[in-house]
Image (cartoon, rainbow, N blue to C red):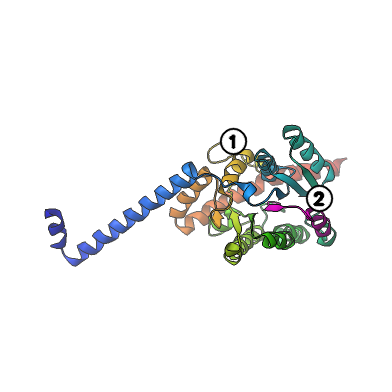
């Protein structure tokens, strides 16, 4: 009682700062509690509640391949969508060897090319199936770490076909069957380049395509949530894959640089919850740290990192050009 009387007897400016301090501490406490629950206590949803089949685009390497294996481990039948028949068959063979009861279909679809034939093959493959989950994982970031005026415009157009058009077209092809049964989940893989940091120099067009994916996902989340369909954009930061191995010294999985298996394991548990999700706790901690930095520091740091990547990635190309010239 005495402490309350002391506080009330203080000047109005003191009371204002006291109230703001209490509100800030309360907000931070709630944030920490929610984060602990999300990453350590919240159970994953029963994916079979959405349906018996899952579609994964880009399943022949990296995060997409890990998604396919993780979904099979959870008992989901798979429709693997990619452009390389040999690689698709190899992934199918490996998953079948581990999970004999899992049914697997493959669909040849070059997401960077003419979509008509690929979409028709996809529609034929899913006809009559209880498709409950779509993972729009396939993405491109080529040409990587390039000043915009130096970029190969044809490569950018192919990248936009994969990152934009294919996501929209495949979602449009799969959504009607989910609406008919009033259940399903769609997961679009975004990027920290468009959500976590205010700019992503040398990857300007790539970051813009991923910003589209985030906004597209959030809008569909609102449109279809009442219809039994969960739409989510997952935001990975760097994951230890073949793509990142060229400019990271550390090859093994770690807290802040998980491998694709660690990422997919966490990602599966997040499906069906938030409209924007960062499944990996190491990535989340980096996001929290970056959010406290002023924009000018983020601009400087990201530009420095990506210019360094550009120099590293230029070396193999220069060696290749030299060998081609001398041969």
Residue 107 image label: 2
User: Where in the figure is residue 183, as x and y percent of width and height?
Assistant: 64, 57
Residue 253 image label: 1
> How far is the residue under mark 1 from the one under mark 2?
31 Å
User: Where in the figure is residue 263, as x and y percent of width and height?
Assistant: 60, 42
Residue 1 found in image quarter:
bottom left
Left or right: where does residue 288 sit relative to residue 217? left
Judging from the image, what secondary structure is the residue with disc 2 in? Answer: strand
Residue toward you, 1 or 10: 1
Report crowding for label 1: few under 14, some 14 to 19, many 20 or more residues within 10 A (C-alpha): some
Q: Can residue 27 be seen in the rendering of this structure?
A: yes
State yes or no: residue 126 in magenta. Answer: yes
Name above or below for residue 205 compared with residue 285: below
State yes or no: residue 270 in magenta. Answer: no
Judging from the image, what secondary structure is the residue with disc 1 in? Answer: loop
Which portion, as a residue range, is magenta?
Answer: 119-139
Give the mark nearer the N terminus: 1 vs 2: 2
Determine the residue positioned at 80% across, 43% down: 88
């Amino acid at each position: 009682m005495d402490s309350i009387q002391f506080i009330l007897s203080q000047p109005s400016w003191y009371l204002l700062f006291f109230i703001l301090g209490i509100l800030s501490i309360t907000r931070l406490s709630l944030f920490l509690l929610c984060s602990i629950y999300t990453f350590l206590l919240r159970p994953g949803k029963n994916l079979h509640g959405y349906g018996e089949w899952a579609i994964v685009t880009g399943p022949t390497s990296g995060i997409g391949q890990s998604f396919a294996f993780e979904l099979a481990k959870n008992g989901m039948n798979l429709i693997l969508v990619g452009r390389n028949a040999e690689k698709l068959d190899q992934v199918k063979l490996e998953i079948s060897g581990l999970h004999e009861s899992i049914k697997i279909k493959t669909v040849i679809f070059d997401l960077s090319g003419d979509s008509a034939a690929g979409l028709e093959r996809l529609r034929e493959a899913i006809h009559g199936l209880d498709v409950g989950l779509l993972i729009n994982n396939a993405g491109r970031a080529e040409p990587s770490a390039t000043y915009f005026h130096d970029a190969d415009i044809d490569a950018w157009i192919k990248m936009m076909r994969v990152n934009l058009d294919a996501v929209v077209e495949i979602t449009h092809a799969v959504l009607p069957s989910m609406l008919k049964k009033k259940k399903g989940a769609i997961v679009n893989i975004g990027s920290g380049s468009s959500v976590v940091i205010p700019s992503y120099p040398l990857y300007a067009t790539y970051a813009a395509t991923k910003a589209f994916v985030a906004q597209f996902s959030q809008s569909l989340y609102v449109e279809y949530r009442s219809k039994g369909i969960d739409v989510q954009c997952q935001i990975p930061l760097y994951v230890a894959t073949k793509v990142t191995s060229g400019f990271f010294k550390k090859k093994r999985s770690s807290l802040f640089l998980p491998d694709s298996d660690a990422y997919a394991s966490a990602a599966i548990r997040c499906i069906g919850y938030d409209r924007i999700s960062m499944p990996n706790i190491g990535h989340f901690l980096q996001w929290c740290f970056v959010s406290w930095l002023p924009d000018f520091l983020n601009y400087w740091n990201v530009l420095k990192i990506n210019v360094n990547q550009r120099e590293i990635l230029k070396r193999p190309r220069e060696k290749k050009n030299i060998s081609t010239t001398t041969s």
